[in-house]
Image (spheres, rainbow, N blue to C red):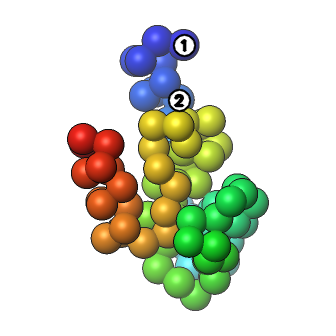
């Protein structure tokens, strides 16, 4: 895949989850996808009641097979640090 195609695959994956909400439990599939990836960042399994913004970014990387360039993490602060280490 070209870089453009890889980017588009990530965006397409993210768009496919539009409308997922905590209020109806539809966000659980995102959490489950993240938790299925091993090893878990910091060995922490995200709970359905946790904030899931960084988890979503990671889950889309997992879904699209881009974890080699998008680090998996469930915390925003830690994810920022990982991206900074990559020079992003």
> Horizontal and vertical percent for residue 75?
42, 72
Closer-to-camera residue (31/81)? 81
Query: Which of the image's four quarters has the N terminus?
Result: top right
Query: Which of the image's four quarters has the C terminus?
Result: top left
Q: Report the residue at 44% width, 64% height from top.
A: 54
Count residues near mark 2 (Cα–Cα under 10 Å), then give few for <14, some for 14-19, many for 20+: some
Closer-to-camera residue (9/79)? 79
Secondary structure beneath dot 1 equals loop
Disc 1: which residue: 1
Is the C-beta separation of discs 1 and 2 under 8 Å?
yes
Secondary structure beneath dot 2 equals helix
- Residue 76 location, quadrant: bottom left
In the displayed structure, 41 sits above or below 18; it is: below
> Horizontal and vertical percent for residue 43?
64, 73
In the displayed structure, 55 sits above or below 23; it is: above
Q: Report the residue at 32% width, 43% height from top.
A: 86
Disc 2: which residue: 9
Q: Report the residue at 45% width, 44% height from top.
A: 70
């Amino acid at each position: 895949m070209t870089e453009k195609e890889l980017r588009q695959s990530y965006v397409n994956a993210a768009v496919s989850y539009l409308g997922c909400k905590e209020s109806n439990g539809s966000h659980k599939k995102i959490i489950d996808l993240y938790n299925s990836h091993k090893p878990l960042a910091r060995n922490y399994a995200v709970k359905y009641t946790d904030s899931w913004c960084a988890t979503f970014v990671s889950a889309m990387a997992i879904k699209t097979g881009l974890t080699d360039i998008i680090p998996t993490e469930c915390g925003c602060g830690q994810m920022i640090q990982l991206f900074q280490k990559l020079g992003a």
